[in-house]
Structure formats: structure tokens, C-alpha cells
Amino acid sequence: KRNRPMAEHGVVRRVSEMMVGTFVTITGEESVKEAANRLLKGNTNHLPVIDAENRLIGIVTTFDISKAFARDEEDQKVSEIMTRSVITALPDEPVDLAARRLQQNNIGALVVIDTAKKVLGMLNSYDLGDLVGERWHK
Amino acid sequence: KRNRPMAEHGVVRRVSEMMVGTFVTITGEESVKEAANRLLKGNTNHLPVIDAENRLIGIVTTFDISKAFARDEEDQKVSEIMTRSVITALPDEPVDLAARRLQQNNIGALVVIDTAKKVLGMLNSYDLGDLVGERWHK
Ligand SMILES: C[S@@+](CC[C@H](N)C(=O)[O-])C[C@H]1O[C@@H](n2cnc3c(N)ncnc32)[C@H](O)[C@@H]1O
């Protein structure tokens, strides 16, 4: 049942409809302190790390900052503490597939990217609350 | 429609079915560093803060640790950086109501408590991924 939940009912919701299009990013060369500042200003837990061509190369979260602090490793660069294999979504994906990816990986957000790895937005798990237990409505 | 999503269909899922029953806690007297260590060991972003009678008095998250670090306030006690008005859920609540509370408050987890404010578990937004876009099935 879980593999064709929406085949015969109503509208398929896409990631692009539920994602947040405003987000902050950082480069790998910046400091852990700067990452913490940017997370605070952005009021977010998730900071995509991009290269000079704006392509996604990692993610640094408040969990990573807290971990670096716990280990006295806060004197590092973002590239040294970031997670390199980022779990992503494409804008046209059905949102329930993305929601399951969040669950399977125990993470709070997916980075939404295009095929050139350019960041388009963030899909936060809490932003899907309205869709819990319902089929899509228009 | 959103206000009676499950009235006439199938099973109502309760918070207790979806919450995680293993969690770590901390007291307000402990240091921010100890909180960061405990978050790391518990592999979690959310640490309920309890008093001597095991009652919930706050929450400290990796966001709060990262914020304290950004502001050079990491030399504080947990009680000084915690959020005091904790957003909670009761174990018997329908999970879709809790999911909407996560969304309305832009937070990743609710603390599940009993009527005596004792912590029973955590409800993580990513753990609801399986319920996105579906009605409950047994
Ligand atoms: C509002 S969130 C901001 C992060 C952003 N919503 C995100 O995840 O991208 C951060 C704040 O929420 C607070 N918080 C998290 N869970 C909470 C809960 N269950 N009750 C009250 N405050 C909570 C934390 O203490 C922290 O100060």
C-alpha cells in the first residue's frame, strides 16, 4: 500500500510546493564560529555548504557545531566539520517520498537542489505537519 | 476539512505510538559544555531539562548551544540558555494534532509528558514521514 499512496487519489504534492525558498549558505573556508553566527541569524538548524560555482558540497548543522564544541574542535574550518554526503531532494519529487527519506535518515531537513547541484531551497520535516494523516487537498 | 481529518476514517494514531521512549535529560545546574556532550552521546538535537523531582522545566537544543557559542556565552549554565516555555504533547493525543503543533512552532520535536510533567518520550517530526499524505493504516 505504501508504495502507491497517491496513485488513484487527488493531487500529488511536490517538494517545490512545501520547501522554503529563502535560506542561508556558507563556504568550506569559513570558520565554525561564522557558521554558528549564520545559523543564528537564519534561525535555522541547517546550513548548506557551497563551492565557488554555487554547487552543494556539504552541510553543516547546529548538531555539528554543538559536536565541535563538545570535542573542543570549534577552532576549525567548516569543511573540516561538515557532512559531505548530503541527503537531497529534487523539486519535482512527490513530497511523501522526501518525507520518508527524512525519516529513514533521522534528519530534520533535506537540501533541495537542481540537476546542476545548485541549492533551490530547504524541505523541513516540521513543515510537513499539515500533511500528516491526510491525503492531499487543493 | 483539516479540523476533522480522521473522524470517519480508520484508526486514529496516537502520539504514544510514534514517540521515541529513550531519551537523555539534563538539569539546569549543568554546564553548556555538558549539554553539548550529552546531545552528542544521545545523537539528538533536543534535551529536556528537568528539576530535582523529574519535572520538565525547559529544553535545550543544539540550536541553543550553537547560539551560545556564536555569542560567546558558552560559559553558562543550562538554565541560562534553555527555552523555558516548552512545547509538549500528551501520549493520548492524535498524532496529526501534534504534527501541526510542530509546524506552527517551527520546531523539530515535542516533549511528551504526563499530567505530572514527567517526561515520557520525544516526538520527532522526521519520525512522522511515513504518515505524510496517507490516512492511518493498521
Ligand atoms: C525555533 S527553533 C529554530 C530552528 C528552526 N526552526 C529550524 O529547525 O530550522 C530553535 C528554538 O526552538 C526551541 N525549541 C525546540 N524544540 C522546542 C520545544 N519542544 N519547546 C519549546 N522550544 C523548543 C529551542 O530551544 C531553540 O531555541
Image (tube, coloured by chain):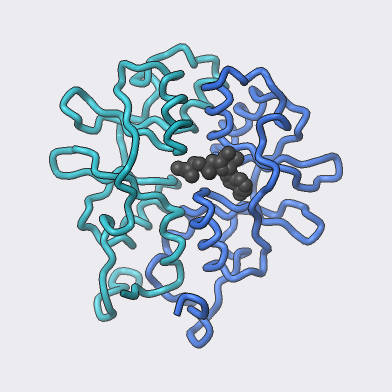
Chain colours: A cyan, B blue
Horizontal side of B122 relative to B96 (left or right) equals right
Residue A130 image position (x, y, % from top left): 44, 65
Instruction: Please count the marks in the image.
Output: 0
Find ligand 1 in the image and state its quadrant: top right
Task: Identify the residue at horizontal 35%, vertical 50% (top origin).
Answer: A123
Farthest right residue in view: B53
Horizontal side of A50 relative to A64 (left or right) equals left
Residue A74 image position (x, y, % from top left): 49, 16
Task: Identify the residue at horizontal 72%, vertical 40% (top origin).
Answer: B49
A110 and B41: which is toward the camera: A110
A82 and B75: which is toward the camera: B75
Q: Quadrant of residue B31?
A: top right
Question: Which image quadrant: the N terminus of chain B?
Answer: bottom left
B81 and B129: which is toward the camera: B81
Task: Identify the residue at horizontal 25%, vertical 80% (top origin).
Answer: A8
Horizontal side of B89 relative to A23 (left or right) equals right
Q: Quadrant of residue B97?
A: bottom right
Position of B79 relative to B112 (above/below): above
Residue A43 image position (x, y, % from top left): 46, 38
Task: Identify the residue at horizontal 35%, vertical 70% (top origin).
Answer: A2
Position of A99 relative to B68 (above/below): below
